[in-house]
Amino acid sequence: MSDMETDQKYPNNIGMPDLSFRFRGRELRRKQPEPKRIAVEPPPEETDTDKCRRHQEMQKCIKMANGRLSYLEHCIRSEKEFPDLTDADALVKFQNEHDELSSQKEQKLGELALCLPCPVLDCPENAKFSSKQNDPPESSVKKHSRSENRDTNKTTKDDRGFVSPKKTAKKLKFSAPIAGTSQPVKVQNKFSSLSVKEAESNLTTSDQTAAPISARPRVPPIMFKYKKANYRSIIKNLNEDFPDCEAKLAGKYLKIFCKTSDEHRVVTDHLREIKEQFYVIDPPDSRPLKVVIKGLPISTEINEIQDDLTSQRFSVEKVAQLTRSKTKAPLPIFMVELEKKPNSPDIFKLKKCCYLAVQVDAFNRRPGVSQCYNCNLFNHLSKNCFMHTRCLKCGESHRLGEFLTNAP
């Protein structure tokens, strides 16, 4: 384009673009000095002790992850076991943490597998790894019998050329006699008639003797809280009426042993009439069977459970709903006491209760000594307690429930 054309197109250079900045930018880029390249030093070499320490740190992380994973699995199972009390946010948090920790554990296992074996010779992990590598795989191909015979028939030579003799023993085969060989010798016992006579005499004597008497049930002792003033007269009257009764000292109590259940009932009635303090410990055979039923709603009434079990031919003595130990909040678990009878059905085979599928487990009582709710003493229950009633809070002659209801 000539100068005249540019003047006509852009008069007085108005609106003509200035292109000089492009050329100046190129020249500046060409003139800029190149940045100095700094030599990067290689990382320090890792020693054998550092590698061994890194192995131990990875193993420690894996063991800690295993412990944390087992705790999270227990938490997840506990949340799912009680669906009515499940915290959805906590369950999602446990599951997310479990997944994340599992991926971290797999990553650590991969890193540990790449780093093995440990360069330290005395490292115990090095011995484990070498034993795993050196163990030859067991071949599934059955070895031929001829090759086995060759291996066993090989003789060992000493350095001096001495050949050890073969020590082979023939295997004895016990089988039926082959036709044409000698038959086994028949042996006859000359005194067999005597054994037959002894057996007949034993049968006659056993018929004459009566059947053995079954063991009598054990009668539980009566724990009588004696007083210095009157215990002699009470024991004297008992010995006059029942001379077979025995009384032994046991701390603050006298253990009264009766021979029969009728004597036991008469003695307890007599002590109640004269208003003496005592309690009775039931033997294990006469104690009720305690089980827990899971799978029913918290709002289920106790009478409904008792009626349903009674209709299924169970002899129910007591039904109670379990609560939390600290907050006393009710739980969807019900404790049932059943009377032990020979013809009663098996409670552990119960599948439905109140038209719902349930699970029956054995009752595991709280650890520790049992405490009476009547006198608040230990080692007996309120059902067989005839001691003076004592409040646990104030010590007066009423139960703890009355104190709590009347408390301001």
Image: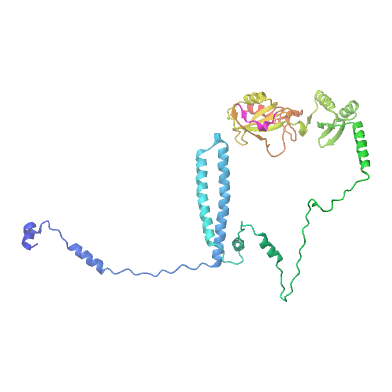
Estimate the x, y position of residue 115 in percent, counting from the top left: 53, 62
Nearest to the observer: residue 316 or residue 408: 316
Image height check: is 248 above or below 187?
above
Q: Quadrant of the image for the C terminus? A: top right
Estimate the x, y position of residue 63 in percent, counting from the top left: 58, 54
Based on the picture, tell me whether residue 211 belongs to the magenta stretch.
Answer: no
Estimate the x, y position of residue 384 in percent, counting from the top left: 76, 29
Quarter location, residue 383: top right
Based on the picture, tell me whether residue 351 belongs to the magenta stretch.
Answer: yes
Residue 20 visible in the picture: yes
Residue visible at 57% across and 60% down?
A: 56
Quarter location, residue 358: top right
Nearest to the observer: residue 345 or residue 39: 345
* Left or right side of 349 for 53: left
Q: Quadrant of the image for the N terminus? A: bottom left
Residue 392 visible in the picture: no
The residue positioned farthest toward the bottom in the image shown: 160
Quarter location, residue 125: bottom right
Nearest to the observer: residue 49 or residue 126: 126
Magenta-highlighted residues: 345-354
* Colour theme: rainbow
Nearest to the observer: residue 24 or residue 188: 188
Estimate the x, y position of residue 233 in percent, counting from the top left: 88, 28
Residue visible at 52% across and 58% down?
A: 111
* Left or right side of 351 for 101: left
Residue visible at 52% across and 57% down?
A: 110
